[in-house]
Image (cartoon, rainbow, N blue to C red):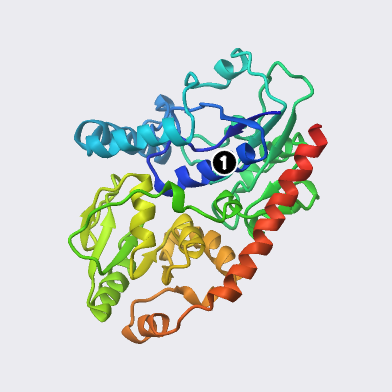
Amino acid sequence: MRVGILTYHFSDNYGALFQAYALRQWFLNQGCEADFINYHPEHVEGGGNIQFDNLFSRKNLKVVYLKLTKIKGKWLGNRQLQDNFYHFRRKFLGIISPEYKTIQELASASLNYDLLVCGSDQIWNPSEHFGIDPVYFLSFSIQNKHVRRISYAPSFGRDEIDSKYFDDLSSLIHKLDGISVREQSGIKIIKDLIGVEPECVPDPTILLSDYSGIMAPYQVSSEKYVFCYGLRSRIVIGEVAETLASRLGADLYSPYNPHRRWKEIGETVYPCPRQWLYLMQNAEFVVTNSFHGTALSILLNKPFVVVGLQEGKAGFNARALNLLELSGLSSRFLMDAKPATVDKILYNPIDWDFVNEKVKVLRRNGIEYLSQQIKEVM
């Protein structure tokens, strides 16, 4: 069986790469041929096209920001780290096919799969500067007219969707043969849109139970350290990480982030994806505001805390909150850096036997859904 996967496999983002790796690896473990359809549209990370009819619009400002960030990363970013991400995609994601930029290129590429899968990550989150990309709903033609098209754990990235996207989303989701989402909030969105309750399945990272074989050592100056994986903002998470490191008498490391516009949190390190996982595994404590930082901390059974994004970014917390609730770890979430709040997390050990049983249930839900989709093709 040939499986084609569409997700954000191209991002130089640790979490995005590991969710992609896990989904493909699960299909490979079932004896399928599984490839990523190497779709990398300009509007994701690169900004897309400027609209000249409304030159100073918020959309255009976003496009310009993304373009400048991409140029800066290409010419002023850490070249070794960029190469490490590239090699990880080639070796562990199997990315060797031609790159497609548009839906027209995909339609004319003579692709031939038995099962098409869109997911996971925030592929269903409409972008302010582009809107909805139908490719991430598998709305393009391929050679096999009987191909089954399904979603696996895509995220809308937030609790609510702007009503201007309702009609397009309804039409695109209706065309899928199998529908699943990652968060409870996604279930409500789809029920409101098309009156159908989709399956709720875990992020692909949870499909795999053992990541030890993919880790690679990374040398740091201290064996005792706190690892901080923060995205989007330093607010609160920086203070929490510093307080925890002080309490534990440990050094503080955070991986390089090309989008960082804030004071670094501790010492910046430059791990490849495999080394990033190693640094998480060997940390005394993990501090994160990232969904995949949360998921992998749980899978690695690491003491951790999730620091909520603040104010205008708070809507992004829904993804981590949902996972914490499902795994019985809601108490690991905090919204402030008060020492008493941090100490309550630090000195409250996690019952990993209890958590791991919860995770097994989540994993079983994902496996049952995917196994049924394979049967439908056969």
Mark 1 lies on residue: 25
| Residue 113 left/right relative to 205 | right
User: On screen, 98 above or below 376?
Assistant: above
Q: Is residue 273 visible?
A: yes
Quarter of the image for the C terminus: give it: top right
Residue 331 location (% of width, % of height): 51, 78
| Residue 357 left/right relative to 9 | right
Residue furthest toward the bottom?
340
Q: Say which of 43 and 273 sits in front.
A: 273
How many labels, in total?
1
Residue furthest toward the front?
213
Q: Secondary structure at mark 1?
A: helix
User: On screen, 341 above or below 117?
Assistant: below
User: On screen, 186 above or below 242?
Assistant: above
Taking the spot 38% from the left edge, 80% from the top edge, the residue there is 346
Please name the amino acid that badge 1 sits on.
Gln
Residue 79 location (% of width, % of height): 23, 34
Quarter of the image for the N terminus: give it: top right
Q: Say which of 62 and 270 sits in front.
A: 270
Q: Is residue 232 visible?
A: no
Residue 359 location (% of width, % of height): 61, 64
Taking the spot 82% from the left edge, 36% from the top edge, the residue there is 376
Q: Say which of 35 and 166 sits in front.
A: 35
